[in-house]
Image (tube, grey):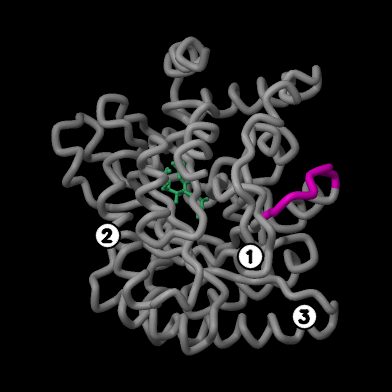
Amino acid sequence: MYNIIRFFLFLFNPEFAHHLAMKSLKIANFFGLLNLISKRNRCKPRTIMGLQFESPVGLAAGLDKNAEYIDCLSKLGFGFIEIGTVTPRPQKGNPKPRSFRLTREKGIINRFGFNNDGIDKVIQNIKKSKFRGILGINIGKNFDTPINKAIDDYLICFRKSYLFASYITLNISSPNTKGLRKLQGSDNLEKLLKKIKTEQKILNKQYKKYVPFLIKISPDNTNLQLTSICKLLIKYKIDGVIATNTTLSRKRVSASNKRNESGGLSGLPLKSSSLKTQKFLKLKLDGKIPIIGVGGVMSGEDGKEKIDNGADLIQIYSGLIFKGYGLIHELCRAIK
Ligand SMILES: Cc1cc2nc3c(=O)[nH]c(=O)nc-3n(C[C@H](O)[C@H](O)[C@H](O)COP(=O)(O)O)c2cc1C
């Protein structure tokens, strides 16, 4: 079935196809059609970061940046949904075209640059939704906020998200916001983690609700960089880490005519570097901090490989585009 839908969607440019697919999903949900698939995709629940996940298969950030489709997406069988990246102020993102399909390689290059409606609007959307499952809110900085003021942007989004998120992700690894990845460097990262951890303690006391936060890292870090990231994660007792965001490497798509498009590459060509990063984290964190594995999960086997190599949960994005929601079911079957 999805092969036919995919054939039709792939006739259009990726951004238009995305909007078309999401609007169609909303219509299908309105007519109750998504309820027909909702109950089939359950696998073993697990408790991670103090949260109960109905299944370990989640939706990665970027697909529903403004939390407009949570209700429909939840019916596809995800165990959790991460929305965003959202910034303090609304912003348009980079000029179009900004998303490219590498069909043969099963990859996507995107340089959206955090196009989103801003945190206030996103929170309004969340309030309107009926979804009561695990919701992650992925936050970032506005493109025109200098890197030395970035923490302020994270703090704004963190405070505004706190009561509406099951967990909050600090996205410090998108390659499409100038300088963002510098926040992974030890000095910047230490300042960021210290501030957010303090804020988490204050908000926890104020609202009597503990909301875990994670950082999302890049697959392009060296082992030395990863080692210092791990030390800080342990030092500040961070709740979790998401590995990984998209890559700047084009090593695995050197034959594609899209290889020179700037932006982050996801999907199958990202699989090995993402898994390598995850394995290194597992080794250094020694089970002390939960890992969400994401990057290149295109089949049940890929998902199982991530879980077998230390991921507590997994997320998908590109796999959903190339294989459809059947992949969620396939992953649940493979992971159990
Ligand atoms: C079109 C597109 C937009 C994305 N936007 C975001 C984003 O806003 N924030 C974020 O943290 N990750 C974003 N990502 C990265 C994904 O969440 C994920 O980490 C990455 O694509 C690797 O997973 P995959 O290989 O399953 O796609 C985006 C990915 C794609 C393909």
- Location of residue 162 in the rendering, given as x and y in whole percent from the top left corner: 74, 68
- Please state if 109 lies on the left or on the right of 250 as rendered: right
Mark 2 and mark 3 residues within 8 Å of each other at the beta carbon: no
Which residue matches tag 3? 203
Disc number for residue 276: 2
In this picture, is 181 found above or below 197? Answer: above
Among the 4 quarters of the image, the one containing residue 206 = bottom right
Q: Is residue 129 magenta?
A: yes
Separation of disc 2 and disc 3 at Cα? Answer: 35 Å
Q: Nearer the viewer, residue 218 or 96?
A: 218
Q: Nearer the viewer, residue 82 or 333?
A: 333
Separation of disc 1 and disc 3 at Cα? Answer: 13 Å
SS at mark 1? strand
Q: Earlier in the sequence, mark 1 or mark 3?
A: 1
Q: Earlier in the sequence, mark 2 or mark 3?
A: 3
SS at mark 3? helix
Q: Is residue 200 magenta?
A: no
Number of residues whose C-alpha sits closer than 10 Å to that of mark 1, classed few (under 14), some (14–19) or many (20 or more): many
What amino acid is found at the position of numbered circle 2 in the picture? Lys
In this picture, is 217 found above or below 237? Answer: above
- Please state if 100 lies on the left or on the right of 260 as rendered: right
- Please state if 115 lies on the left or on the right of 74 as rendered: left
Among the 4 quarters of the image, the one containing residue 287 = bottom left
What amino acid is found at the position of numbered circle 3 in the picture? Leu
What amino acid is found at the position of numbered circle 1 in the picture? Ile
Disc number for residue 178: none
Number of residues whose C-alpha sits closer than 10 Å to that of mark 3, classed few (under 14), some (14–19) or many (20 or more): some
Which residue matches tag 1? 168
Separation of disc 1 and disc 2 at Cα? Answer: 24 Å
Q: How many marks?
A: 3
Q: Residue drawn 85% across and 45% down?
A: 128
